[in-house]
Amino acid sequence: METAALTADRSSKTRTRFIDIARCIGIIAIIVGHTGDPGIQRIVYTFNVPIFFMITGYFTNDKTPFPRFAKRKFRTLIVPYLLTCLVMILTALLTASLTGNDVIGEVKLWLYASLYGAGYNWTEPFFISSIGLVWFLWATFFSSIFLRLLLKTKSTIRILLVITAFAVGFISSYIVWLPLSFQAGLCGILYMYVGYLFANAKDTAAGFGKETKALLILAAFAMWIAFIINFKGFWFVICDFGNGIPDIFGSICACIGVFTIAFFIEKYLKHSSRILSYIGENSIFIVCVHAVEQNFMPWDNIINLILPNAGKALSLFLLCIFKLVLSISLGCLISRIPLIRKAFGMK
């Protein structure tokens, strides 16, 4: 048995299915995590954002010229961000017009949120409204650019710079939150670098015996479970890493656990793996749809209208289903529209 994310072929023109399955698991975890339920969050927040940084790092190398690399990242991350923000502003204008709210005020609110790119509402040094999940696109862009530049340095210097970048992002977040989720991007470099190291260690990992691989995987799952049990919060969006180093290590182990689960799904659940990998392939579209859905869909009102006397557990279940069905189905649907694919930099 090969060890999950350590075995993908980065040079292959075909997609690595278990990586796409891991993306699918990650986007599902993000969506259900946004239900606000603490029980769900203590599980999914251990990996739902870190895994995307690690996957991006896994597919990063220094073979592509930097200008071409940067242009590609801008096209596939920032252009989708801008288009999603435009949809949010237009949605705010429409809903304000229909409900009789302050149209200009709503448009300004979402315009400022789009320009600042924060994933959380801040009150200092001035009020900053959250733009929602798409904060992650700016953070990923910065992390990708920085890691690509660091790959030209010596390994010892690179490690020090990765740690320094994480420390600067983490510490400065307690002083002021900078625009475009810059600090989250600095912290994300660490996870991208780990993904990069995993990719370069795949040949070494392939030589491990079955017992060694099994022991390493069991150790990763044990650390992941310990992280869940001792969960104190892990909010990448504001550079809050809970218990610090133990939780950072735990989140890496959680990602290894997800990659392992994805690997087994690909190997033993062929039909399910095709569906899940298709969802994972289209994760960028689902992210953007979910960002709009999260900000504008009045789910509580809808659930109360359908089932006025639904209990907490049933309401939570319905909320998860509604959010997943809408975000995934609509995201996959628009991914098939050639004009939108082209706008998102996809073939």
Image (cartoon, grey):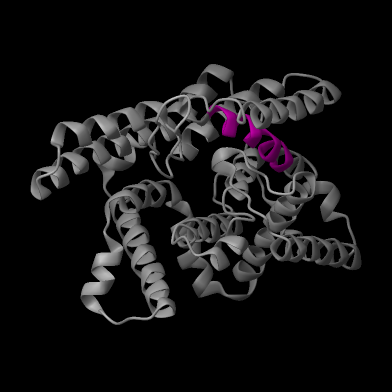
Q: Position of residue 338 (x, y in %)?
A: 27, 44
- Vertical relation: 69 (above or below) 46: above
Residue at point 63%, 75% (across, down): 268
- Which residue shows up at 30% across the image and 65% down it? 300
Q: Residue at x 66, y 66 (%)?
A: 261
Q: Residue 5's spot in the image, x, y percent?
A: 69, 53
Along the horizontal axis of the image, is 231 left or right of 17? right
Q: Quadrant of the C terminus?
A: top left
Name the image quarter holding residue 270.
Answer: bottom right
Front-lying residue, 88 or 240: 240
**How many marks on residues?**
0
Which region is colored magenta?
Answer: 182-195
Residue 316 sits above or below residue 175 on the image: below
Residue 6 seen from this side: no
Say whether residue 289 is visible: yes
- Could you tell whether 132 is left or right of 203 in the image? left
In terms of secondary structure, what is the magenta stretch mainly?
helix
Give how far across and how far down residue 322 sits, in percent.
33, 68
State the quadrant of the N terminus: bottom right
Quadrant position of residue 260: bottom right
On the image, the x and y values in percent for residue 336 come to 30, 51
- Residue nearest the viewer, comparing 284 with 96: 96
**Residue 155 position by quadrant:** top right
Question: In this view of the protein, which residue sits in the foreground, 51 or 298?
Answer: 298
**328 within the magenta span:** no
